[in-house]
Amino acid sequence: MMRKYIPNSILRQLIFLLLSLALLFLVLYHLSAFLPGFLGAFCLYVLLIHPLRWMMYKWKMKRIWSVILLMLGSILVIVTPIYFLIDMLTNRVSDALANKDKIQAQIELGLQKVHEEFGVDVLKEINLGDVSAVIVKVVQEILNTSINGLLQLGVAYLIVYFMLMNYRKMENWFYDNIPLKTENLVILNKDLRDLVISNAVGVPVVAVLQAVVAYIGYLIFGLDQAFSWFIVTIFGAMVPVVGAAIIYIPAVIYLLASGETTNAYLLLAYSLIVVGASDNIFRFWTQKVMADVHPLITIFGVIVGVNIFGFIGIIFGPIVLSLVIWSFRIYKLEFSGNTQKDELAKEQL
């Protein structure tokens, strides 16, 4: 009886692959702190590559100037709201620490009025001292995350600069070395672009539009420092399920505590009806013009993303979760023998 041996060529391949994977794991482990920066670079590349080609081939601009202009424009769009958030929260934290007792008394007054009007005794269920400490801790965490986000953004722009300057070589390497069929690589390219645009553009756009609608209400009903509430509402609107309510409900309580009872009720009604409806309208619109991401992917993606990346995980979490689900689709197309036409036919049944 002849024994079967593994050929030396296969053994060498296995050893080479194991060593390569071990080295890759070692490198990724030590660069894991910059993972948000790498994801950010990938998202920026997807968003900027088509405008770059347009500027180079339609406007006949040199690549270096096209890249610089696109990077400066995107920095302005991304950094401006983060700057306002950090500046506003820094001032608010300083004021809150200096006037902690006064603010706590205001909150107690507002919650007492809620109890008188609606019969909900929130003060009985919570310790405001603990709540104040938690709020300060959360705000400080957001500040730390925002500062870390700026660092990661710097890493992302450093990487994306070289990606854009050498995009042809990079894309050719991608098509030559990724072990997938050409038709599946085309699917991969399109799906990744739709996925990034839907999450990295769709989520912030919906949040900004909803915050603008809320800001109009803040101005109409006399909320002090309405612009600061507007900036916070942008980031609150990105949180799934609760959304902008995490901001406008405290705003209503603040008006109650200030004695603006009528305005508080009107703002609450406006927020529940108009702001709530605008969220559905804007999401429906973005789903029509961008890729349709299932709400459960958004919800669980945010949970995963926040645990891994911090606050910026609100954007990256759904992308990572969608990539996991998408990888199974590519595996099925690559190895099951089904084609994209077969998949589309099944979806129409």
Image (tube, rainbow, N blue to C red):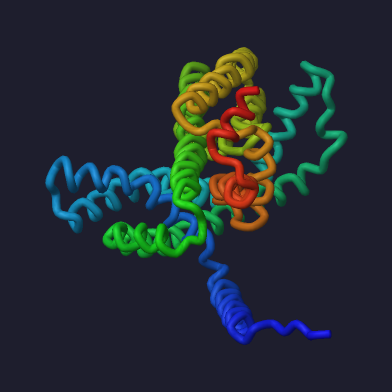
> The N terminus appears in which quarter of the rendering?
bottom right
Nearer to us in this view, 15 or 154: 15
x and y percentages locating residue 286 in the rendered image: 48, 27
Q: Position of residue 342 (x, y in %)?
A: 59, 34
Query: Which of 207/271 is in front?
Result: 207
Whether residue 303 is visible: yes
Q: Residue at x 74, y 22 (%)?
A: 113
Q: How many marks?
A: 0
Identity of the residue drawn at 50% across and 33% down? 291
x, y percent for residue 319: 56, 47
Where 156 sits versus 265, above or below? below
Looking at the image, is 14 positioned above or below residue 218?
below
Q: Left or right: 47 with respect to 168?
A: right
Q: Residue at x 53, y 63 (%)?
A: 35
Q: Residue 47: which quarter of the image?
A: top left
* Residue at the (84%, 19%) spot, across then down: 119
Specify whether residue 95 is in view: no
The extreme front residue here reads 1
